[in-house]
Image (cartoon, rainbow, N blue to C red):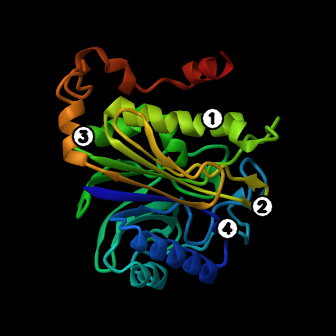
Amino acid sequence: MTTIGSVAANFGRDLEENYRTIAHYTEIARERGVDFLVFPEAAIGGYLSSLGNHGDTAPTSRSLPPAIRLDGPEIARVQEIIGDLVVAIGFCELDDDGVSRYNAAAVLDGSRVYGTYRKVHQPLGENMSYASGGDYRVFDTPVGRVGLQICYDKAFPEAARVMALQGAEIIASLSAWPAARTATAANLQEDRWTYRFNLFDSARALDNQVFWVASNQAGTFGSLRYVGNAKIVDPGGNVLATTTLDEGLAVAEVDVAGTFAAMRAGMFHLRDRRPDVYGSLVEVSDPAEERTLASA
């Protein structure tokens, strides 16, 4: 059996406060026997304070998240805090060129970085602040084969499917997902962007028959109001545990091998695919076609 935890919490620019929050949830996770703990996108240094062509999306802005190297003191500090606990966590990664910045995530414990990911799909002007990643990979860890993706990636079925085909057993989806920017619902749990966030989580788990761990920021930062709803979803799309809007830790104990054996004995989506008819999925459309789709 494997116990999975997913965090909904607020992370801003104050690194010391971030470390205290990480330590707080790490301690709770240990008390509850968690083997794999997922923190949100940008848990080290915070996310952008706005989305769109304004605010700190401007590349010269002084309020961008701190750029962190994998071998830098910030990651080392997190490893010191978490010890032997396997953790997925988001941060702004500085490339080896010393210039390019990526919205990134890593899966690691106190002694090893098992793998890293740079966000591929960028929403609403995020490309003004970050370069984009170019691949999806799956990493062998003490808790199984883990895939990583970040926020808007979950809107693209192909992203999760690529990792499922690489043998992902658990996909960690780290987010800083806000409520809708217009016509926001009075009750954020009923907001249309909250609905999409939750629907994507269940759909991607069921599409690929994998365990799906969705973490998210909570509270507010700049103009963004985050919707929380950290959760663990089973391969049937069932939510096993969730924080809803609140900050907190969702925890579920799962039997990865047993669940896969039971669910995939009948309908196994990966086995029953028909790649021979999916060719159009990987065709690159020309700009004219993209404009037609955007205006449809």
Query: What percent of the width, then of the height, locates residue 42?
Result: 56, 63
Q: Are marks 1 and 2 in contact (CB under 8 Å)?
A: no
Give the residue at mark 2. Answer: 222
Work out whether mark 2 precedes mark 3 in sequence or the reverse, and give the earlier one: 2
Work out whether mark 4 precedes mark 2 in sequence or the reverse, and give the earlier one: 4
| Among the 4 quarters of the image, the one containing residue 3 | bottom left
Mark 2–mark 3 distance (CA, rounded to whole Å): 41 Å
Q: Is residue 266 above or below residue 122?
A: above
Judged from this view, the residue extending furthest toward the front is 32
Q: Who's the residue at 27% across and 46% down the image? A: 168
Q: Nearer the viewer, residue 102 or 91?
A: 91
Q: Is residue 197 left or right of residue 70?
A: right
Q: How many marks?
A: 4
Callout 3 crowding tier (Cα within 10 Å): few <14, some 14–19, many ≥20: some
Q: Nearer the viewer, mark 4 or mark 2?
A: 2
Q: Are marks 3 and 4 in contact (CB under 8 Å)?
A: no
Q: Is residue 29 above or below residue 266?
A: below
Work out whether mark 3 precedes mark 1 in sequence or the reverse, and give the earlier one: 1
Three-letter residue code for mark 4? Leu
Mark 3–mark 1 distance (CA, rounded to whole Å): 27 Å
Query: What percent of the width, then of the height, locates residue 209?
Result: 31, 34
The local secondary structure at tag 3 comes to helix
Query: What percent of the width, then of the height, locates residue 270?
Result: 24, 29
Q: Is residue 153 above or below residue 56?
A: above
Three-letter residue code for mark 2? Gly
Give the residue at mark 3. Answer: 259
Work out whether mark 4 precedes mark 1 in sequence or the reverse, and give the earlier one: 4
Q: Nearer the viewer, residue 242 or 128?
A: 242
Three-letter residue code for mark 3? Thr
The local secondary structure at tag 4 comes to loop
